[in-house]
Amino acid sequence: MKRFGGKVLFLDRSDINTDEIIPAKYLTEISKEALKPHMLEDLKLEGFDPEDPEVRESKVIVTRANFGCGSSREHAPWVFDVNHINVVIASSFARIFRQNMFNCGMLAIELPEKIIDLFFEYKDSSAKIEIDFKNNGLTITSDKRSDTFTYQISEFDKALVEAGGWVEFAYAKY
Amino acid sequence: MAMTLAEKIFKTHLRDEPFPGTKVLDIDVVMCHEITTPIAINDLAARGKDRVFDPEKIKAVIDHVTPAKDTKTAQQGKILRDWARRHNIRDFFDIGRNGICHVLFPEKGFIRPGYTVIMGDSHTCTHGAFGAFAAGVGTTDLEVGILKGVCAFREPKSIRININGTVPEGVYAKDIVLRIIKELTVKGATDCVIEFHGSVVKNMSMESRMTLCNMAVEAGGTSGVCMPDEVTVDYLWPFISNEYKNKKAALNDFKKWWSDDGCEYVKTLDIEVSHMEPQVTYGYKPDEVKDISEMAGTPVDQIYIGSCTNGRIEDLRVAAQYLRGRKIAPTVRGIVSPATPKIFREADEEGIIKIFMDAGFCVTNPTCGACLGMSNGVLAPGEVCASTTNRNFNGRMGKGGMVHLMSPATAAVTAIEGKISDPRKFIKKGKR
């Protein structure tokens, strides 16, 4: 199983699509590692710089609604994975992206908009999120404050993460 | 209990329910292209599992970048080609016979009502036009599909869209689906199947129904679907005539998939088209849609007619009606990509290719290329494209480029005027 949690990257916009996460011109790569420099290269977000070292050090993304819409490309979770981001927390996800995350043994956590709003109050501090996978718990912390919540994922999605992904789960079972 | 079409397909294809709410389905058709499949193929090989569950049920095509533009894309094609040969996948389509997957595979008769279909491509929802459950998936789902012939889904909810009224001249399936996405929003159908009903759909060709279902994913939908009827039977007849006594028998069989009266919908939306204007997107999301009268006059640099949304023969015929005897504006570039070799040939025989060329269009081979900014028509930063494709995302057709989605008719008249234009103006003047 992967290790989850760490420094947070806040992406304050809804409907961030997979073309923005990894542009199609890089889909000609046949290794996941080759995607690494191009994470979020076309993201349309005021003040966002994909080259910022802060972006590169992040381990968790906190964002708004319908994250990962558009293309089915699994290159989107992959480019996060090779950059050591394996948790995305959003108020909602596009179906294929969400499934791709769990299929790769990564976490796509949906939380109510009110809680996401509260997370964004941490935006200007160097926030960290720790995940208690076993108990479906997560804690966001800065120098000044800390908040703890529980999240829900389906039994199936939890089993995929524990197995290391859908390939491992399916090959053992079918 | 009254069931939706999707529920019926789930019931008949259920292999396992490992956890409540998770349905593992047997898959009838696993489709593969050269962009999302090679990593699955390499992973299977690395795991010592270089096998396929059933070579007859796997269909493969090189369509995104073809002919190969560089070493990397040549390599992707080679991985798919070598794999198809190694596993005797007969339905593999290489250059000369290849076309855009979601146009080519229906044309070959691979899709039937009641089928489960997956592909590592979000526009797989197109095939629901035949009354199939067809869903885009990622490479991991594709890999498991290739080896085991199964895929896991949540039980889908269904949304019913009733499209009624008289379709005005100059308005097409693309305009209707853009309007529907505007109403649903880009996340309004997440985890849902979108059913298209109503007199307008009944009277639509399979080509137009595929345009509707193709864009279901732009509202977040898992699959778009139409109830299989006489039009479906006619389209499929060359492929099923030895399976049924007559067309009536086929229709009766297909009807078993229809959503039952009284089945459950999470949402019902009524669309009245009689006074609808042609629709055009203005922003970077497919639900940012306006009436043509608000968009007319916007200058463009390139016009693109093609893609799995609007590269079918019907689309080329419509565009040609407006372009016949006319020239595109000197300030714009026009590119048309017939979606398959059959469509290219038909367009040639009908004189449509000549109309496009006389008008000043470049006619390319069948490929997805320009739609996702991979090849054959990438935009420069700051350029604007009037496009019959499906996504207007930032950078979609080239970094820094702007895309306005529209019907082939609107794209054709936009090419003539050099700025976004209303096809109805051409009908009124008798210019069409």
Image: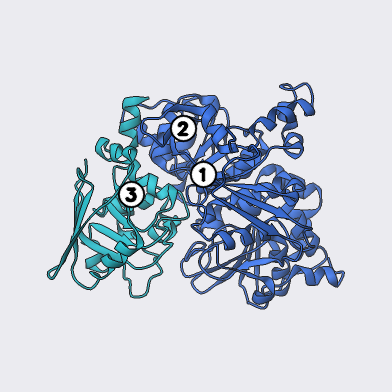
Number of numbered tags placed on the structure image: 3
Circle 2: residue type: Asp
Q: Relative to B224, does residue B323 appear above or below in the rendering? A: below
The residue that label 2 is drawn on is: B82
Position of the C terminus of chain A, as image quadrant, is: top left
Circle 1: residue type: Lys
Whether residue B366 is visible: no
Report the chain shown in blue: B
**Residue B8 % position (x, y):** 57, 32
Q: Is residue B184 left or right of residue A43?
A: right
Q: Give the colour in which the image draws chain A.
A: cyan
How packed mark 3 is, by other alpha carbons closer than 10 Å (few <14, some 14-19, many 20 or more), is many
The residue that label 1 is drawn on is: B157
Q: Chain of mark 1?
A: B
**Residue B405 % position (x, y):** 61, 64
The residue sitting at 81% across, 63% down in the picture is B324
Q: CA distance from mark 1 to mark 3?
A: 29 Å
**Residue B266 % position (x, y):** 54, 49
Q: Chain of mark 2?
A: B
Q: Relative to B233, does residue B322 appear above or below in the rendering? A: below
The residue that label 3 is drawn on is: A78
Task: Indicate the secondary structure of the residue bearing disc 2.
Answer: helix
Q: CA distance from mark 1 to mark 2?
A: 39 Å
